[in-house]
């Protein structure tokens, strides 16, 4: 018995054609679903970003690059650099732009705040604690905390675990199946980078149609790397002109939604700082 990745039913081998039978569950469709053009479950979910991806101040979707936002050690809110810059311009130098609490500087205070969230069963608090373990180069405890966070549905924890098992970092052996499961779980929650990597792994298995579908979704979420891959497939005649145009429109719409004057100014200043 094999589970169909579209209808999610457990069906006998005879319900699948030979080509589908050899695919992993998330990419496999029974003959009935193929005939009906039923989409895979992983394609039906995560086509838009959740509201939790918005900056809580400007209410715009956070940039995909983590370097363009940061979480606050007092309340663990993730704010875009644009809002942080705007707050500093207004003289808010020592307190959080969101909760207005004084910004703790001692690592012991920060860890204690995170631990309270962990004890309360908060998956984002677990993710933040795992990140602190990472900074302390305690890989074993970091991975354990990422796993706890992922079990409670934190998509960024799924993404980090996908990267760890894909690359074999932090003393962990490469496990392609685990990497795909974590990337797919994050992708179905609207995580664009994870969707991109699911497409890459599909391409490595020569599942070009599936890879293209993932990249089209990631491009519509505003991920430039995915748009570049769709363009490459178009240049190789593996994607149609209509598909490439759809990816372009989706990418530019998402990029526009993520942009603001404050974010642009923050990006300019960050770039100037890096050059210096």
Image (cartoon, helix red, strand yellow):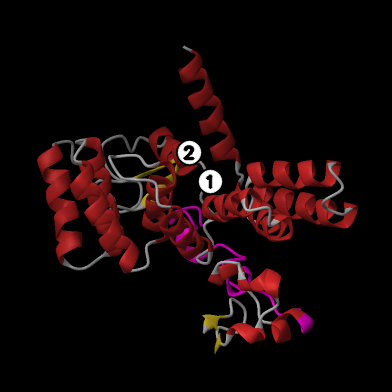
Q: Is residue 125 left or right of residue 32?
A: left
Displayed quadrant of residue 192: bottom right
Q: Position of residue 268 (x, y in %)?
A: 56, 26
Res. 68 mark: 2
Magenta-highlighted residues: 35-59
Name the residue rendered at 53%, 81% in the picture: 3
Residue identifier under label 1: 63
Taking the spot 64% from the left edge, 85% from the top edge, the residue there is 14
Classify mark 2: helix, strand or loop.
helix
Q: Horizontal and vertical percent for residue 190?
A: 54, 62
The one of 158 and 132 positioned closer to us in this rendering: 158
Instruction: Mark 1 and mark 2 in contact? Answer it, CB < 8 Å.
Output: yes
Residue 151 is left or right of residue 183, and the answer is: left
> Residue 141, relative to residue 25: is it above or below?
above
Name above or below for residue 247 compared with residue 32: above
Image x and y of residue 93, in percent: 31, 34
- x and y percentages locating residue 218 in the rendered image: 63, 54
Q: Residue at x 39, y 35 (%)?
A: 88
Tally of numbered discs: 2
Left or right of 31 on screen, residue 120: left
* Residue 259 falls within the magenta-colored stretch: no
Secondary structure of the residue carrying numbered label 1: loop
Magenta span main SS: loop
Badge 2 density bin: few <14, some 14–19, many ≥20, Cα 10 Å: some
């Amino acid at each position: 018995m094999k589970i169909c990745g579209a209808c999610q039913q457990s069906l006998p081998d005879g319900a699948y054609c030979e080509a589908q039978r050899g695919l992993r569950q998330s990419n496999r469709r029974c003959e009935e679903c193929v005939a009906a053009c039923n989409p895979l479950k992983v394609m039906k979910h995560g086509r838009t970003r959740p509201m939790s991806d918005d900056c809580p101040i400007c209410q715009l979707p956070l940039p995909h690059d983590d370097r363009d936002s940061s979480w606050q050690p007092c309340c663990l809110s993730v704010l875009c650099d644009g809002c942080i810059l705007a707050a500093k311009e207004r003289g808010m130098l020592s307190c959080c732009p969101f909760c207005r609490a004084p910004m703790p500087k001692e690592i012991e205070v920060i860890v204690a705040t995170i631990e309270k969230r962990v004890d309360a069963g908060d998956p984002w608090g677990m993710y933040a604690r795992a990140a602190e373990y990472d900074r302390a180069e305690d890989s074993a405890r970091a991975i354990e905390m990422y796993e706890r966070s992922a079990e409670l549905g934190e998509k960024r924890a799924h993404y980090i675990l996908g990267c760890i098992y894909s690359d074999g970092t932090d003393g962990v052996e490469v496990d392609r199946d685990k990497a795909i499961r974590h990337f797919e779980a994050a992708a179905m929650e609207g995580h664009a980078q994870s969707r991109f990597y699911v497409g890459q792994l599909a391409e490595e298995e020569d599942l070009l149609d599936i890879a293209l579908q993932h990249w089209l979704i990631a491009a519509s979420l505003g991920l430039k790397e995915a748009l570049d891959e769709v363009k490459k497939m178009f240049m190789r005649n593996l994607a149609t002109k209509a598909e490439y145009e759809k990816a372009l429109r989706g990418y530019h719409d998402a990029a526009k939604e993520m942009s603001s004057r404050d974010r642009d100014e923050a990006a300019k200043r960050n770039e100037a700082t890096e050059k210096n």
